[in-house]
Amino acid sequence: MGMTILLIGAGHGHLYTVSKTRQMVELGYRVVVINASRYHYYSGMGPGMLGGMYAPDDIRFDIEKMVHRGGGEFIEDSVMKIDPERRVIYTSGGKIMEFDVLSCNTGSVIQDTIPVDSNNTVYPVKPLVNLYHARSRLEQAKKGLSLHVVVAGGGAAGVEIAANVYGRARTLPIDARVSIVTSGTLLEGFPQKASRKARKWLSKHGIEVHEQTRVAGINDKNVSLAGGRDIPMDICIMATGIVPPEIFSRSGMKTGPDGGLDVNEYLQAQNYPNIFGTGDGIYFSSHPLSKAGVYAVRQGPLLYSNIMAYCRGESLEAFVPQKKYLLIMNLAGYGIAVRGKLVLGGRTWFRIKDSIDRKYIKRFT
């Protein structure tokens, strides 16, 4: 057996490399994939799953099946620490594994800065399967029941989640009184036209938006706001912003300001050319990137090419981020499309998004 190529995580940035498992194995490499679950859920369709538009099987990839079909090894576990000098990783399940080449697609986690005193009412948006658990909670409610649902976070994820909670509740039917609480403004960082379109849709469907308001705490019955006011709450979905996990700082590796693995233009870790990174868990030092899935998707083929080039001792290719990309938000079947300063809205844009997303799923399944 030749060199061991070890992949941590199986998110958007690693899907292309995972799909090439058979080619790597046939070239004589040992391929090992470690992921916390056998499934990877596609984030672009997560809010639609919450809203009842998709079943879980519609939006997830069976990573274990993909790896085994290609002749690789799959381990359902989480990596806690990397020793880049000894070229080993340590898992939460007690495994110690050696590697020759390591690639990290660790994803991101919700920023946990809000005190929570609740066991079964709070659903962080990461991992994405939590959105299905929140949907199940809605579906278990008695018809006609009034539920208070609070979404913490006013970014694109928060807007999509609030809209799809409303959409699912309407079809059950239950009376879901949905609120968004954000410490900034709605869709902060987006063009004002996008914010106006989102506000108009949310207001039309009775969804309250509390801006410039910080969540101070959460218990089983209320979301407490800074200043002393409480909002009644039966379900709270946390979409307050994401950060890389602590694995890289814990491992003593060079990280960016947010704790992401500091990588160069070839997606290689600083000081360790045999370690690569992709997706939300990296800090692309030559051109810091927003946490947008489109970058991980575009990094995928180049990452695989660079891993193979490194193994063969060949030149690597630099990743050049696109200046503009298309983002389409799903508001329960109504789409808001944003590309640079261009903003368009309508149900046609949701249909375009749905078509793009389904093609992406089909590509790897």
Image (spheres, rainbow, N blue to C red):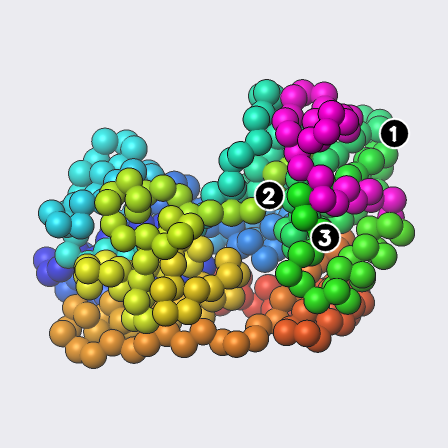
Q: Find residue 12 and report its image quarter.
A: bottom left
| Mark identifier at residue 186 | 3
Q: Secondary structure at mark 2?
A: loop
Residue placed furthest toward the front: 227
- In the rendered view, tell whether residue 225 sits above or below residue 294: above
293 left or right, relative to 81: right
Question: What residue does disc 2 label?
Answer: 240
Marks 3/2: CA–CA distance: 12 Å
19 left or right, relative to 214: left
Q: Is residue 208 rendered magenta in the image?
A: yes
Which is in the foreground here, disc 2 or disc 1? 2
Amino acid on which the number 1 mark rests in the picture: Gly
Q: Which residues are magenta?
A: 205-232
Q: Secondary structure at mark 3?
A: loop
Pick the front one: 287 or 70: 287
- Label 3 or label 2, whichever comes before in sequence order: 3
> Which quadrant would the N terminus be assigned to in this image?
bottom left
